[in-house]
Structures are given as structure tokens and as C-alpha cells.
Image: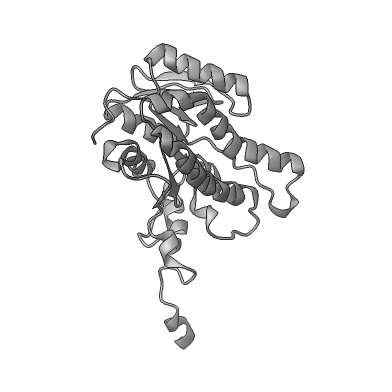
Amino acid sequence: MRGLAGKVAIVPGGCTKIGRAVVDALVAAGTRVMVADIAEGSGFAEGVGFMTCDLRDDDQIKALVEATKKRFGRIDFLVNVACSYLDNGAASTRAEWLESLDVNIVGSVMLMQAAEDELARNRGAIVNFGSISSRVAQTGRWLYPVSKAAILQLTRNQAMDLAPRGIRVNAVSPGWTWSNIMDQLTGGNRAKTDSVAAPFHLLGRAGDPEEVAAAVLFLCSDEASFITGTDIRVDGGYTAMGPEQASPAIPLLMS
């Protein structure tokens, strides 16, 4: 895709399965990448930078931006993969709500503020991470879906106010994807993940991290030069389906 070679991206959450797929895709396209994460980073392609960064700490965010400029000389893209899955539903405490919102929303805004002048100088782009969870009620889950819904509104607001500075802002909303949380929940069983995901997705499986990364790459590229304030649902048809799922209901009534 055009407009990626020689550019520089910061990827908070780059040590996750989806984050690594995003980093690998950017590197393959010729983009230099600074990974930021609270987890230890290793095993990245040669030339990829890594910096420990907690998005709840403004000083660490500022240090990340400065380190990226010092190492690579510019900043063109922010890809906000990092998120918290903390969620105790209706029983979530005030502290848990603030923790979730701080990581999932506020941290990315503080990063945007710290990098805004660089992004404007280079007519850059931001890609936020929403989720299919932002559009439906899910039993026992409040913090994650609410924060993801807020991210989509944030994306629209950012797109409006940053457009005069030449910065595009979009989001991707993955469906069930082979990610760290799916790995943890199933004990590394991808086949089980696909089988449970199948009825909820028109394509009958969970997504691959690389499929999400492809959408991110497109939104960063010049191919998306007239796209801002929108959300790409990389969800295998999840949100198109509705409650009936991918199996006929009428035969159940006749059986």
C-alpha cells in the first residue's frame, strides 16, 4: 500500500497477539515501529524499537514520544492496540471503572496529545481499537463494552477536531479474534475458539490477528486518504447477523 514506507508508528500494546501482527504488517510495508507495552518486548523484527510504557502515566507517555522522535526522527501513526479486559460487570467497583477507562480511553488521548504536533507535521493517522462488544449487550460485561463504545465516539470527535491539522482518525472493531484473551480462556485451544465462535460469525470462525492488522495497514496508508471518523468492522459478519445466528430458526419450530 502507498504511503507506508519510511514512516514511523507507535504501537501501544504491541506485545499482544494482535499487536504483534500489526507490528509485523507495518514492518513488512516499510514502516519503522516503536512498540510500547507493560509486558516485556522481545522477538520483534530487526530495527523495531521497544519501550516499557504504562498508559496510565503521563510522564511515561511523554518519554515514549520523545524516545520515538530521537530514534526514528518522526512520528506518523499511532495504533492504539493496548486495552484492559478488567470487568466484573454490575459489581465493578469505582476503582475498576476508573482503571478500565484510564487504560482503554484516557491513555490513548494523552498519547495523542503528546504526539499531536508530530502527527500534524507529517499529516499522520491514528487507528483506535473498538470492538464488536461496543454494539451489543453482553451478559456480565460492563467495563469493556462501555469503554469500547466510548472509543468509537472518541474516534469521531478526534477526527473532527484533528482534521484541520491534517490528521486522520479511524477505528477497527474486531470480532472474536485469536488474541491473548482467547488463548488464555481456552488454554491455547484455537480449534475450540473457532467452534464456539462459529455460530456468531457468518464466516464460521474466529479471525486471525493478521486479518485485523490488514485493516489497520489500510487505514494508515494513502489508500485511505479520504477516510476519517469511521470504523471498519473486522468481524466475520458478526454485527451483520443479528440474534438469529448463522443457523435457520424455523426448522427448530418444526422439529
Q: Quadrant of residue 228?
A: top left
Give the number of callouts.
0
- At horizontal 39% and vertical 41% (from top left) the residue drawn is 209
Percent coordinates x, y for residue 255 in the rendering: 46, 86
Residue that sits furthest to the front in the current view? 164
- At horizontal 55% and vertical 34% (from top left) the residue drawn is 109
Can you see residue 12? Answer: yes
Q: Quadrant of residue 138?
A: bottom right
- At horizontal 68% and vertical 52% (from top left) the residue drawn is 89
Q: Quadrant of residue 200?
A: bottom left
The quadrant in which the N terminus is found is top left
- At horizontal 44% and vertical 61% (from top left) the residue drawn is 239
Percent coordinates x, y for residue 57 in the rendering: 63, 24
Residue that sits furthest to the top in the current view? 70
Depth check: 119 or 239 in front?
A: 119
The coloring applied to the image is: one colour
Depth check: 33 or 245 in front?
A: 33
- Relative height, residue 246 to residue 166 (above, below): below
Residue that sits furthest to the bottom in the current view? 254
Percent coordinates x, y for residue 114 in the rendering: 53, 24
Can you see residue 129? Answer: no
Percent coordinates x, y for residue 119 in the rendering: 42, 27
Left-right relation of 68 to 214: right
Left-right relation of 149 to 205: right
- Relative height, residue 211 to residue 30 (above, below): below
